[in-house]
Image (cartoon, grey):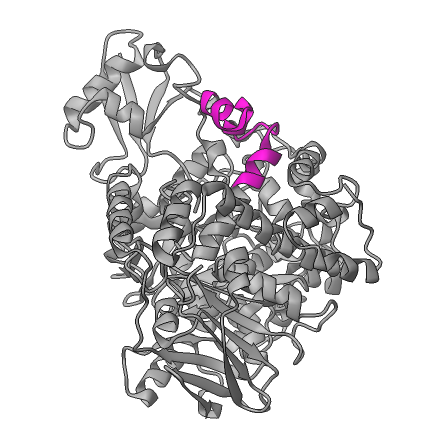
Amino acid sequence: MKVTVRFIGIPGINVNSKKIFADDTPRVKELLEKVCEMFPEIFPSVDHIVDRFLVLIEDKQGKTTNIRLKDGLRTVINKGESLIVMPPLTGG
Amino acid sequence: MASKYFGYAGRVLRLELTKRKHVIHPLEKELIRGYLGGRGFNSKRLLDEIPPETDPLGKENKLMFATGPLVGTGFPTASRFNVSAKSPLTWILGDSNAGGHFAPEMKYAGYDQIILEGSSDRLLYIFIDDDDVSFIDASHLAGLDVYETTKAVKEEIGDESVQVVAAGPAAENGVRYAGVFANLMRAAARTGMGTVMAQKGVKAIAIRGSKSIDVAHPDKFEKLVEKLEEDIYNHPQYWPRRIMGTTRILLPLNLGGFLPTRHFTTGVFEYAEEVSGERLAEEYNVKTRGCFSCILPCSRFWVIRKGKYKGLYGEGPEYEPLSAFSARVGNPDIQVALKANDMCNKLGLDALTTAECISWAMECYERGWLTKDMADGLDMSWGNEETILTLIEKIARREGFGDILADGVKKAAEKLGFGEEIALHVKGLEIIQADPRGLKGYGLGYVVASRGGDHLRSEPFFELSDDPERGRELFGIPETALRLEYKGKGKLVSFFEDWCAITDALEVCKNVAENMEVLPFDLSGEVIHAATGIEMKGGEVRRIGERIINVERLFLVREGISRKDDTLPKRFLEEPMPEEAINSAGSIFELEPMLNEYYTERGWDLKTGIPTIAKIKELGLEKYVDNLRELSIPLKDK
């Protein structure tokens, strides 16, 4: 299946989103590994993403959940859900 | 402590405007030990020198500029100053903070604090050249905007490198939310400090210094500077902040459903992508610019290359004005937002308060309370470009409907006799661009902030971390890490308020020191020791932050502020976030339990919100107890 990964506020990525082809019901880890393959200079490893960025799962309605609050990298992505990767959010 | 001043310039300059004289006196060492600098110095001195019920625009009010012990050294981001007085907008503590290059020049000229007293019967600008102070006729500068004033003053002095703070025509016209602007666009905009300056008869202050700042332990200081620089460079937010500045948060706020849109009637803006920091960076930004001694140049020069505003250029904007002049007023065109922000900078207005006044009027129009006739024939529909830009000009000139809006949203509602329940302010200061129903710690921060509805007194960003385990570890309450939960937010906000008070006292950048978590209390103690020679552990540093918060609260209490004033507009307490704000839908602000927890954490009386005598004494402020009793302020022992 195709999973959309959106990137918000990450310099160096000049696209708002990327479609990733994966097996049915992939886990977050598998998708992030593909993200690392696409942008190795920005995301050298999955651990790097998890340590330094927020990874959110967005459902069909647009409701988001931080993967830390679900089950981390083991969480299964279902059809219609997408991933969002962005820097940790702080003040302005 | 040593007799020589390390870190500090060691002197205070008092400018007596009525007589056009000046006095220089030593910086009081008890002020250093108790309040560190900047905002701490100003708040303490305002409490001591401004009697209750002083008219903010009268001669008795004082306008104070202060900077901190790290400013003027190579310490990263130490470039800022606070400007404070009793506010003509809120009639409580007025205070604002800006970066740029003015503050280090103050130190090089030999001053930690500059105090403007009395008022001049004609318009002046003041030139401070080390120990020489000149009061110069500025009648020829009357009506000039901030840019024109800054340029004219530099030209007259004949030195492009002289540092200038200026007020614009809005301040001269008595608009109650006009700011003080350094380096053209570094705005100390909130609470009307420019208004106080202009009403004292001062159009600008120019400063030039040739002295230097000694630090107590240069080797240790240098190592700490290197550590901080490394921590900043390696931080995951370094590049996003460098490229987009604070505008990077616009899209995430929209995603979260708490981006104030059409005067907080919803939390999602359908044009968010078009007005985002990403869009600004891609299409308009030319280069970045930093404040003095900053390695994270987060301000950006932009230029509009095509369209109606072709050729317009400027610096910034920060998230707040960009978002306020787009989502808040319902405007989908980023160029209009840039133009509106540019106008506010030049006219010398607080962009946030201006945008609240305009969006409030638009909602009043939509509800049928305000008619076109009442608004000088302007079409007050959401996002109307002509209306937004015309009203900014009218407010600054106090013309027609602009005159009604020029005293702030609270007064506008009083004058018109409607719209009070949707006037979005706390204690008279218009609230910022984040919906408190979607960010409860921030909301509590607005409720209790000593200058009114503003986030920069606390910035409890930790609630955005979504990391309950860390919440339990740091605060003993997992919910502190979850933005939609209210539990633990009293504890969270009091911690972050103390931290912000320290960053404002050291006059380092809050975006870096606090938001990026690179300068916690323990490390601040190390830095203070290296710079000033004063031994200070982290706990003692935090205690100074707490003292500053309490001194400011006492100033407010003397002006009649109590628990009844620590609240939010009805909209946030009674109207749940609408369904389309998916990630915040249904959320409402639970004021009472949060306030109880906050007062308990602070050691303030639950019934009145006034610091108890035990807390006042614990902080070494016992000399104020008799004064408060004389004013019949109800004080509880504990």
Which quarter of the rendering shows the N terminus of chain B?
Answer: bottom left
In the displayed orientation, state which residue is furthest to the top. Answer: A24
Quadrant of res B74? bottom left
Q: Residue furthest right?
A: B632
Q: Position of residue B42 (x, y in %)?
A: 55, 64
Using the image as rendered, state which of residue B350 and residue B242 is in the foreground.
B242
Q: At x 24% / y 43%, what residue is drawn? A: B230
Q: Is residue B262 visible?
A: no
Query: Where in the figure is residue B629, as x and y percent of width and height?
Result: 82, 58
Looking at the image, residue B597 lies above or below residue B344: above
Identify the residue shown where x is 65% and y is 81%.
B59
Q: Position of residue B621 (x, y in %)?
A: 67, 55
Q: Tell me the quadrant of the picture where the C terminus of chain B can be found.
A: top right
Question: Within the magenta stretch, is there residue B484?
Answer: yes
Which stretch did the figure color magenta? B469-495
Q: What secondary structure characterizes most of the magenta part? A: helix
Q: Look at 29% across and 65% down and name the residue there.
A: B310
Q: Is residue B284 left or right of residue B571?
A: left
Is B129 covered by the magenta stretch?
A: no
Residue B304 occupies which quadrant of the picture? Answer: bottom left
Q: Seen in the image, is B498 located left or right of residue B615?
A: left
Total numbered labels placed on residues in the image? 0
The x, y position of residue B287, in whole percent, is 22, 57
Q: Is residue B278 above or below residue B29?
A: above
Task: Judge whether residue A57 can be spotted in this image.
Answer: yes
Relative height, residue B566 to residue B391 (above, below):
above
